[in-house]
Image: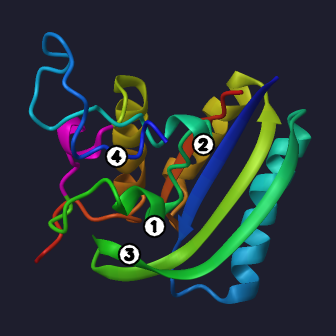
Amino acid sequence: MRDYEIMTIHRPDLAETEIDSKVSEIESFLADSGGSVTKRDLWGKRRFAYEIDHLSEGFYSVLTFQAQPETVETLERRLTLADEVLRHKIVRLEE
Amino acid sequence: MARKNRRNPKPVRGRRYESRRGKPRPCTVCPQGGVDWKDTGFLRKYMSDRGKIRGRRVTGLCPNCQRQVATAIKNAREMALLPYVGGK
């Protein structure tokens, strides 16, 4: 198990409640594949420093979790395919 | 007390420091222990107002911290937290 941190940017046209459930989806995926989420932080809507796909804002969320490297790989793949996620970044946390 | 008189240092035999800038200041990031790439306010301190990453001779960071700050800024840029080009 390794410590990771994931930041996702969801589309701004989703509703606040939808964001919550989308983030929960990620959380439950991690939990189902043997990981555990230690911290959940919804930043809310935030302006971008530059335009992404002609959008100027998005919903930011940050999760801290533990998981196997293979789990992270599949999560990575799923997020790339997900249309509602504009961008994501998974970073390994060092001690 | 000995440190106070920085402007007029006692003459030392031989040249202690290569530059005329005087004594190099210690790295300001090291004591914090690690750099958070999500902390944009902190990272902005190491960028020019055009959004460029400031060089080590400007920031005065140690090689390790400078590298950490630089990658942190790049991470933040990818997530649109910081600009690639800051229109002045």
Label 3 lies in what chain? A
Q: SS of the residue at dot 4?
A: helix
Residue B69 or B75: which is nearer the viewer? B69
- Could you say whether the residue bearing mark 3 is in a helix, strand or loop? strand
Classify the position of the N terminus of chain A by image quarter.
Answer: top right
Span highlighted in magenta in the image: B52-60
Amino acid under label 2?
Gln
Q: Do the residues labelled 3 and 1 touch (CB within 8 Å)?
A: no
The residue to which callout 1 is attached is: B41
The mark that comes first in sequence, 4 or 2, is: 2
Query: Which of the two discs, 2 and 1, sits closer to the camera?
Result: 2
Q: Name the residue under label 3.
A: A48
The amino acid on which the numbered mark 4 sits, given as a three-letter code, is Lys
Q: Which is in the foreground here, disc 4 or disc 1?
A: 1
Left or right side of B82 for A62: right
x, y percent for residue A78: 60, 46
Q: Disc 4 or disc 3, which is closer to the eye?
A: 4
Q: Distance between the residues labelled 3 and 2?
A: 27 Å
Seen at 66% across and 28% down, the residue is A94
* Residue A33 horizontal/vertical position (percent): 86, 35
Q: How crowded is mark 2: few (under 14 residues within 10 Å), some or many (20 or more)?
A: few
Name the residue: 27% across, 65% down.
B83
